[in-house]
Image (tube, rainbow, N blue to C red):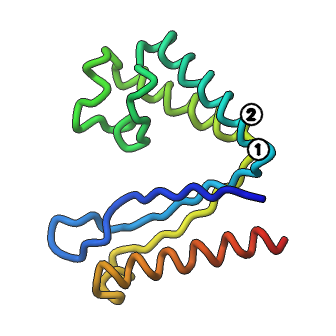
């Protein structure tokens, strides 16, 4: 059996000020490996806390690590080079785990064709579930 965690990035808006993209990402984990992955993730977050003083409860977001427009990480004394270092370490960590990642990307033109937030969400989820199904069939 597998677990599929889903998260989004961007938004489904088509009005001015909306992001030009909408992503759905699914992380597929075998239930037999879930505890090990969870423990590894916890240890990685403890490492970030010890090495960079980044609290375990603070969310890691690639956009914030690379840009930090909201100054989320600066309050922990993380300079741009340190944030990039954390980003690289996070990528290395994720690639070491026994999991699969699937993505759906809808760009601005696709959002305009789909027209409504509901159509954008439904289309993205339909494609994500299809990719999950394909994974299960392989």
- Which residue is drawn at the image coordinates 62% and 54% (left, top)? 27
Numbered tag placed on residue 29 in the rendering: none
For numbered disc 1, what is the local secondary structure?
loop
In this view, the residue farthest toward the right is 138
Disc 2 crowd rating (10 Å Cα; few below 14, some 14-19, many 20+) is few
Q: Position of residue 93 (x, y in %)?
A: 65, 33
Q: Quadrant of the N terminus?
A: bottom right
Q: Is residue 71 above or below residue 134?
A: above
How far apart, in angstroms, are the residues tagged by discs 2 and 1? Answer: 9 Å
Q: Position of residue 73 (x, y in %)?
A: 32, 26
Residue identifier under label 1: 98
Disc 1 crowd rating (10 Å Cα; few below 14, some 14-19, many 20+) is few
Q: Position of residue 120 (x, y in %)?
A: 38, 79
- Which residue is drawn at the image coordinates 50% and 25% (left, top)? 85
Q: Position of residue 114 (x, y in %)?
A: 35, 87
Instruction: Return the residue nearer the eye: 57 or 22.
Output: 57
Where residue 4 sits, quadrant-wise, is bottom right
User: Does the CB distance between marks 2 and 1 fall below 8 Å?
Assistant: yes
For numbered disc 2, what is the local secondary structure?
helix
Name the side, left or right, on which 100 lies relative to 75: right
Q: Quadrant of the C terminus?
A: bottom right
Where residue 76 sits, quadrant-wise, is top left
Residue identifier under label 2: 36
- Which residue is drawn at the image coordinates 74% and 75% (left, top)? 134
Please tell me which of labels 2 and 1 falls first in the chain: 2
Name the side, left or right, on which 19 lies relative to 130: left
């Amino acid at each position: 059996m597998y677990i599929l965690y889903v998260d989004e990035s961007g938004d489904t808006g088509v009005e001015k000020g909306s992001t030009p993209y909408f992503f759905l990402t699914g992380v597929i984990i075998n239930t037999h490996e879930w505890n090990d992955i969870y423990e590894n993730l916890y240890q990685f977050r403890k490492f970030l806390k010890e090495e960079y003083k980044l609290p375990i409860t603070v969310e890691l977001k690639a956009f914030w690590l690379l840009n930090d427009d909201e100054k989320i990480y600066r309050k922990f004394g993380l300079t741009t080079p340190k944030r990039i270092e954390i980003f690289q370490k996070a990528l290395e960590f994720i690639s070491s785990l026994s999991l699969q990642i699937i993505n759906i990307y809808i760009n601005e033109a696709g959002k305009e064709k789909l027209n409504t937030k509901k159509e954008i969400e439904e289309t993205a989820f339909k494609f994500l579930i299809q990719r999950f199904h394909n994974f299960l069939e392989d």
